[in-house]
């Protein structure tokens, strides 16, 4: 399964809770995760549409940038 990684400004578990409904809608429940230990706050998404992921995070008030 292909995974896409994004650098985000999601900082804590409360932030993850806020973005959950948005990401579940576009990526699917249990098809994404945020690494809060990584300084880049990496969001990993299974089989994502990059534009929809970025837009979903923007709706929730966060930013994302795809990592190479």
Image (spheres, rainbow, N blue to C red):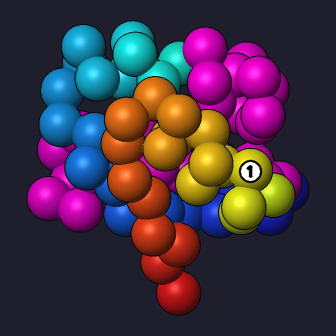
Where residue 47 sits in the image (x, y, percent)? Answer: 83, 54
Tell me which segment is drawn in magenta: 21-48
- At 37% from the left and 35% from the top, the residue drawn is 61
Residue 67 against residue 3 in the figure, above or below: below
Q: Is 32 one of the magenta-colored residues? A: yes
Residue 48 against residue 67 in the figure, above or below: above
Q: Find disc 1 in the rendering and name its residue.
A: 52
* Count of numbered labels shown in the rendering: 1
Where residue 30 sits in the image (x, y, percent)? Answer: 68, 22
* Picture quadrant where residue 32 is located: top right
- For the question of whether residue 42 can be seen, the reply is no
Q: Is residue 28 left or right of residue 36?
A: right
- At 62% from the left and 48% from the top, the residue drawn is 55
Residue 15 against residue 38 in the figure, above or below: above
Crowd band around label 1 with a 10 angstrom C-alpha radius: few (<14), some (14–19), many (20+): some
Q: Is residue 28 left or right of residue 56?
A: right
Q: Is residue 39 left or right of residue 30?
A: left
- At 18% from the left and 37% from the top, the residue drawn is 11
* Picture quadrant where residue 35 is located: top left
Residue found at the far bottom of this picture: 68
Q: Is 28 one of the magenta-colored residues? A: yes
- At 53% from the left and 34% from the top, the residue drawn is 59
Q: Quadrant of the N terminus?
A: bottom right
Where residue 5 sits in the image (x, y, percent)? Answer: 54, 64
């Amino acid at each position: 399964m292909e995974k896409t990684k994004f650098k985000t400004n999601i900082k804590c578990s409360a932030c993850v809770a806020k973005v959950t409904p948005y990401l579940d809608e576009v990526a699917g429940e249990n098809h994404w995760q945020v690494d809060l230990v990584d300084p880049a706050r990496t969001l990993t998404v299974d089989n994502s549409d990059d534009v929809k992921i970025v837009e979903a995070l923007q709706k929730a008030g966060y930013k994302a940038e795809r990592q190479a």
